[in-house]
Amino acid sequence: MKFTFNPSPNYRTSQSTSGIMKDLTECLLAVLVFAVIYYCGAYGASYGLRIVLLTACSVIAALCTDAVYFKATKQDIRQGILTSYSWVTALILTLISRVSVSYYGMIVCTVIAVFFGKLVFGGFGQNIFNPAAFGEAVIMANFAGSYSEDFVTSATPTTVAKASGWVGEFASQYGGFGNMFLGQYASTIGSTSALLILLCCVFLIWRKDIDWQVPVTYIVTVFVESLIVGAITGSGAQAAVYNVLAGGVMFGAVFMATDPVTSPVSMPGRVVFAFGAASLAMIIRWKSNFADGVLFGILLMNMLTPAIDKLFDGNQIKDAAKFRKNVLITCVCFFAVTLGVGASLKTSAEEEDSTAAAPAAATEAAASSDSASSGSSSASGIALNGDFADNEASCELTGDNVYHCTAKGFGLINNMGGSYSENEADIEVDPSNNSIVSITVTNFGDTAGVGDAAVSDSALAQYAGKTLDDSVDSVSGATFTSDSIASMASAALKMAAGN
């Protein structure tokens, strides 16, 4: 890889700052238009209109923040707005947010992103954090409760994978990698179409707006680290492709990690920055409470940018050998830590087994707490007397102690549409002790190749002899379907008991 020095964006000889921002704005608008069209087609015109209104709220809030700041500091407002480029921050912030974020949350976080993320540092070119990532972090930390319940989409790929410990096969739930590459699924507003983002990347590189080494280093790092971890955990090569396509990896690599203001000025420094941001994203994704770690990985590396610049301070030609050595050592350290974390990944079922080996008192307390609050997986599995409200299970007596039951699964709970339907089963109950004799699935309405693991003979056999006081194991990678089957078993037992 060729390491050459690149000065700050204001002094690029091949492209002016205004030209860079114009090209970037056009690419962001292209991604925005795609999102509006997709959401209109998949969820209705109200969703597309909401994206437009969220964008308008963010852009207007950004421009007003600029105007107030430049007025208060006695600067020319028009010139200040035109050279602050805060609309770019607003567009990125909108595109990395969910469609369900409230207008109030978007406005407040845009103001915070522009003012505290950029203007207080002296404006464009002086900020130390990526303003859009800073604003999105505020949304995630403080406005999670302000999301609109009227605009609900399906579970995102990172959320689904997170629920199963990032071990398993998940792409089929979204129509396969082809659909994910084209962006035919819901996630954050602008992160889905890998094809469109790649086209934007090629355009920006061709226009010399960004350095190709940064997005390539970021994406390749995610792919290689995920490939090795997938081989270790048994997920295979699909884990590498899934990690690249899911969440904000592609968008972050092209539109955020390439920010020349908040990243190192030298090329070897930027390579280290991209490698570190990608590695931290994987660590956060795999082990933190957040389903995706892209923006936090970038924010953490923003803080390390001065140290990276110092590490690669010197003559870019005379010290090239030393810089290559520093790049290698730094990347190897990131690589080793990331693989160490990834190698410890376990499926939900394995984590449950590990928890079950803890002291009995702690296990019983955790199981009691989880059973009282919901019917989802806990230390003892899925409690049959738990809350399965989302599944909307119902049963009717159709034979001698046989109940025909229906319940929502993954597709219907997450509004996936398409060929998804209710799961149906015939459940025989022993009236002598109100226990399940057998479960026979008569209609499987969830994702073939994934959810059907929860309706296999071995998975259903565990219900034999179970009562409402018992729990069953959730099938890793098919937790929604597991809950659906458990909800029907619970409904049948309650109906048999006269509840």
Image: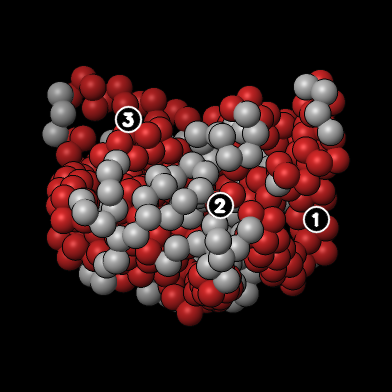
Secondary structure type for disc 1: helix
Q: Earlier in the sequence, mark 3 or mark 2?
A: 2
Q: Identify the mark nearer the N-term, 3 or 1.
A: 1
Read off the residue under disc 3: 367
Q: Which mark is residue 11?
A: 2
Does residue 58 appear in this view? no
Q: Is residue 476 above or below residue 419?
A: above
The residue shown at (66%, 45%) is: 89
Q: CA distance from mark 2 to mark 1?
A: 34 Å
- Cα distance between the residues tagged 3 and 1: 45 Å
Numbered disc 3: secondary structure? helix
Q: Nearer the viewer, mark 3 or mark 2?
A: 2
Q: Nearer the viewer, residue 232 or 302?
A: 302
- Rendered residue at 29%/41% (across/down): 313
Q: Of the residues shown, which amino acid type is indicated by label 2?
A: Tyr
- Left/right placement of residue 402 relative to residue 97 reads left
Q: Nearer the viewer, residue 64 or 247?
A: 64
Which amino acid does the dot numbered 3 rest on? Ala
Residue flagged by tag 1: what amino acid is it? Val
Residue closer to the observer: 97 or 27 = 27
Front: mark 3 or 1: 1
Classify residue 103 as left or right of residue 253. Answer: right
Q: Nearer the viewer, mark 2 or mark 1?
A: 2
Q: Position of residue 223 (x, y in %)?
A: 31, 65
Mark 1 nearby-residue class (10 Å; few <14, some 14–19, many ≥20) = some
What colour scheme has been applied to the protein in the rendered image? secondary structure
Residue at the spot 73% in from the left edge and 67% down from the top edge: 33
